[in-house]
Image (cartoon, rainbow, N blue to C red):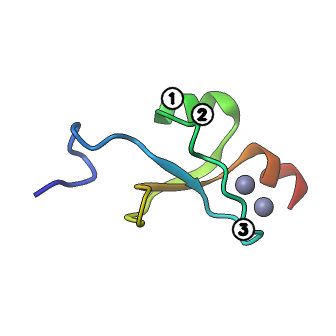
Amino acid sequence: MATMDDPSVPFSLMCGCYCGCDAGEEIESRKQADAEGWTEIEADDGHSWNYLGLCPECRSNC
Ligand SMILES: [Zn+2]
Ligand SMILES: [Zn+2]
């Protein structure tokens, strides 16, 4: 059974902001997310993502 820590599960991130933002598809790794200014990244077993965070745009605009 695949888990969050399974390296075969690709990192996928979704902005969890209440505004309905759908940023995150272009982020391919936790490292890239950090580099682009994402914050509050946490494991979340969603439909098409396994991490939720707050994108840099929402961090400054929402
Ligand atoms: Zn966002
Ligand atoms: Zn937002």
Give the amino acid type for the residue marked by disc 2 in the picture. Asp
The picture places residue 13, in percent across and down from the top left corner, at 51, 49
Q: CA distance from mark 3 to mark 2?
A: 21 Å
Q: Secondary structure at mark 3?
A: loop
Q: Secondary structure at mark 1?
A: helix
Query: Crowding near pointer 2: few (<14 within 10 Å), some, many (20+)?
Result: some
User: Residue farthest to the right?
Assistant: 61
Please give the count of numbered marks on the rendered protein: 3
Indicate left or right for 12 with 20 as reference.
Answer: left
User: Residue 15 sits in which quadrant?
Assistant: bottom right
Q: Give the label on residue 57, or none.
A: none
The picture places residue 26, in percent across and down from the top left corner, at 58, 37
From the image, state whether disc 3 or disc 1 is nearer to you: 3
Give the amino acid type for the residue marked by disc 1 in the picture. Lys
Is label 3's Cβ within 8 Å of ligand 2? yes
Q: CA distance from mark 3 to mark 1?
A: 24 Å
From the image, state whether disc 3 or disc 2 is nearer to you: 3
Q: Which residue is mark 2?
A: 34
Which residue does the image show at 40% across and 55% down from the upper left?
A: 50
User: Residue 33 sits in which quadrant?
Assistant: top right
Q: Are marks 1 and 2 in contact (CB under 8 Å)?
A: yes
Say if 56 sits above or below 36 in the image.
Answer: below
Q: Secondary structure at mark 2?
A: helix
Indicate left or right for 37 with 50 as reference.
Answer: right
Q: Nearer the viewer, residue 47 or 56?
A: 47
Q: Which residue is mark 3?
A: 20
Q: Nearer the viewer, residue 25 or 36?
A: 25
Indicate left or right for 13 with 5 as reference.
Answer: right
Q: Give the label on residue 31, or none.
A: 1
Q: CA distance from mark 1 to mark 2?
A: 5 Å
